[in-house]
Image (spheres, grey):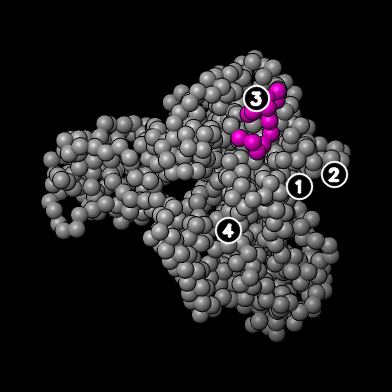
Amino acid sequence: MSHEEFPTEEPAVVTCGLPYANGDLHIGHLRTYVGGDVFSRALETIGQQTAFVSGSDMHGTPIAVQAIEDGVDPEEFALEWHEQYEETFPKFAVEFDNFGHTHDDTNRELTYEIVEALEAEGYVHEEEIKVAWDPTEKQPLPDRYVTGTCPYCGETARGDECDEGCGRHLEPGEIEDPVSTITGNPAEYRDRTHKFFEVSELADYLSGFLDRLEGTSNATNQPRQWIEDGLQDWCITRDLDWGFDYPGSDDLVLYVWVDAPIEYVASTKQYSERVGADTYDWEDVWKADSTPADDSEPASGGGEIVHIIGRDIIQHHTIFWPAMLRVAGYAEPRSVMASGFMTLNGKGFSTSRNRAVWAREYLEEGFHEDLLRYYLATNGGFQQDVDFSWSKFRERVNGELVGTVGNFAYRSLLFAYRNFEGTPETDVSEEVEERIAEAVEEYRAALNDYSIREAGQAAVDLAGFGNEYIQTNEPWNLTDDDPDRAAVVIRDCVQIAKALAVLFEPFTPGKAQDLWEQLGEDGSVHDATIDAVHESPPGAFDEPEELFEKIEEDRVAELNEKLQERVAEATDDESDAEEGDSPDLEPLAEERIGFEQFQDVDMRVGRIESAEVIEDSDDLLKLTVDIGIETRQVVAGLQGLHDVADLPGTRVVLLANMEKATIFGIESNGMVLAAGEDADLLTTHADAPVGTKIK
């Protein structure tokens, strides 16, 4: 790894977080995979040797549970989804150089090699821990079989992660008030012996690693808090039948997050074996030459490893994964790009409520894949949350793709065809040469800043310049009075169009190829590098066609109606189910409290005075809440669930005598009460004065 600006002399690998092989893909999933494909293509465009790899995550508790429910073998169940992903990704022009899966032999061999290295280097120990146990089913409960309370922030959490609150990774036995997801009954904790990777011993290395790490700021900054809080050793085994057995054990399997990232290496190796090491050598990328004695220093050797993931798995990729690589003698990642979440019309996706735009649904509506690719890649910064609506989609397509890029390309090539039967025989003006060179530099700079959006903007801005240039120079008024000047203007425009084909290829590969062919170019635009933006187009080409079609407003109305009907139907089905068994509601607590205990709970009517996002946090806000007697500072997990700007003035209920806590380095003095996954804020029916006690 060089840390030099791209392109470098070292080979690169771009990886995407593995899709979990247990369900359909929706456009929220596609944001990361399209982003990875765009970034990989763009690196190759500027001359960086790159492999783009991923694979299906076949192991883990959810797959085992669903396979049991479906009455099929877990491997058979997961393979069906893996094969579906293999078919779906190319339909969105997401073209991996290799797409494997975690249950194949290559991953198995590399996983055992790395785990055995952790053992040999003395970084694995056995420890007796408390493991959740279902007394009714008389079986241990792996992490995803358990829900309960996060010991760090008090929010509802899964057994392996506080997904509703602070986002922390949770070890077996940490979750409080455990409940079995199998029966819904309280679970017990029993002693079991498990294997632990001593991540805590690598704190100095990981601190130095984060200092070197490039990528999005959420990925480079968020993990520092975990190190500052003190790293805990990582339990790397589970009580489960599905997965890779721990070497030498017949009753424990490796935790899914051990073998999942190793698939990045396995998939790269499979690609290398297919094309030959002379073309691409996986060891040049992944293997370190030596490990320095100073824990804070990086190992030498290795290529440019770029991980593109969802922000919910930052900890795995910036703490556990580099720690494993370090001990096993592998190179460390150069960068981690973590995307924000997708929402739909301002609300979170819900697969259970069918509240999502599914990948297959988008294709069935007849839209070209490049429209969605462009929207996902350029609609906001990569680490920002993005809200999808059909109206916003239409606006971006009509405004930028149709109105700016498509309009310029079509009018320029049509005028060139009708007046010169192709590219005029003259040189490009110095002004346009410089503007194209400026766009290329902006493009390169954006990639080195890991900003996919800005790279796309560099291309759009060039098209915008082209529109202004042709409008200002009015070649249609020059053809009779000054034909030589008309030829220069149109020659400039054709050159800009060729530059756009090259710069837009990572974002809209299908339409970029169409433009390439309209220019009369041979071969594939996918093989063109950045130098092609300055090369002369062919002298003759045919009459062009428009690249993009407008999306009409009534089409959006139709799409919105379909979506609302589908969501309403799913919600009605869920409501019907809740009237019966209420399968999605938590069971009532069996242990009751007395009136005197309730009297000890001090809940007050409050009013939010201010709200601000906590930097580098995924979902936390810092609130000031007036409760009459005083104003309290409170940390609440409301980011992404409420519009921050709308919160000031909102009346809430505050648990005032809750012990103070420090969350994400900020003191929280109380708890704002909210209901359900969407954090429906509790309030009063009438206008009880601020500070009124709840009785």
Q: Judging from the image, what secondary structure is the residue with disc 2 in?
A: helix
Disc assigned to residue 274:
2
Please name which of the two marks, 3 or 4, marks the residue nearer to the observer: 4
Q: In the image, what residue type sits under mark 1?
A: Asn
Disc 2 to disc 1: CB gap under 8 Å: yes
Q: Which residues are magenta?
A: 240-252
Residue in the picture at 20% in, 47% down: 606
For the residues marked 2 and 3, what is the alpha-carbon distance in whole angstroms? 27 Å
Q: In the image, what residue type sits under mark 4?
A: His
Q: In the image, what residue type sits under mark 2?
A: Arg
Label 1 crowding class (10 Å Cα cut-off): few <14, some 14-19, many 20+? many
> Closer to the camera, 193 or 200?
193
Disc assigned to residue 26:
4
Please name which of the two marks, 1 or 4, marks the residue nearer to the observer: 4
Please tell me whether residue 251 belongs to the stretch shown in magenta. yes
Q: Which residue is mark 3?
A: 326
Q: Which residue is mark 1?
A: 98
Residue in the picture at 54% in, 63% down: 357
